Image (cartoon, rainbow, N blue to C red):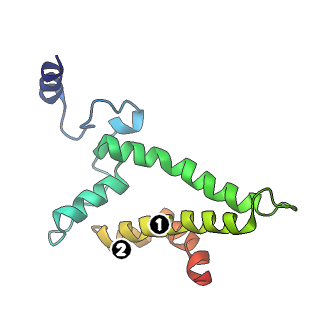
Amino acid sequence: SSNSSRARFLRDRRPGMESMSSCTSLHCLAPRNRLPKPRDRQGKWASGIWRFLEDPESSCAAHYYASMSSPFIMLSVFLTCIQTFEPSPIDPLIGAILESAVEVLFIIEVAMRFFVCPNRKVFFSSPYNVIDMMSTLPLLMRG
């Protein structure tokens, strides 16, 4: 029964390992000690959002969200590239709207990661975060 399998899962899981049994990728099985510890003044919501966005093994939802980030980035690149063809295979207005929507979602993610980050110095010392912030500049400059 599902109750006995859940009880077995809860009994057998080890601290610091993936807490959701349906995530089976190797990165879900990595220890969680690589992320900064949450600040004391940071609330439960901020800590939860930070873990969700930065730690794919914190939950299956976080794992699936992280696994969708690469296709999302590829969609953004594809939309940008497809608009360079002459004649454009999609209406320029629709292309601009789609590209802007993807960029807005990306800006929201970067802003959320920044505001819930336990240590802002660590946030700015990460080259990935700096690249993410620089990639949001085109939309901010257009706006």
Three-letter amino acid code at the position of disc 1 = Asn
Where residue 28 sits: x, y (%)?
Answer: 35, 38
Q: In which quarter of the image is residue 77?
A: bottom right
Q: Which of marks 2 and 1 is nearer the N terminus?
A: 2
Where residue 75 sits: x, y (%)?
Answer: 62, 53
Q: Which of 38 and 96 is in front in this view?
A: 96
Residue 103 in view of the camera: yes
| Residue ranking furthest to the right | 86
In 3D space, how far apart are the residues under numbered discs 2 and 1 (Cα atoms)? 11 Å
Q: Do the residues labelled 2 and 1 touch (CB within 8 Å)?
A: no
Q: Identify whether 109 is placed above or below 29.
A: below
Marker disc for residue 2: none
Three-letter amino acid code at the position of disc 2 = Lys
Q: Residues within 10 Å of mark 2 (few under 14, many from 20)?
A: few
Residue 119 in view of the camera: no
* Mark nearer the viewer, 2 or 1: 1
| Residue ranking furthest to the top | 1
Residue at 38% across, 43% down: 63
Residue corresponding to mark 2: 121
Instruction: Name the image quarter holding the C terminus.
Output: bottom right
Q: Identify whether 19 is placed above or below 83.
A: above
Where residue 122 sits: x, y (%)?
Answer: 36, 68
Residue at 37% across, 71% down: 114
Residue at 58% across, 76% down: 139
Q: Quadrant of residue 83?
A: bottom right
Q: Is mark 2 on a helix, strand or loop?
A: helix
Disc tally is 2
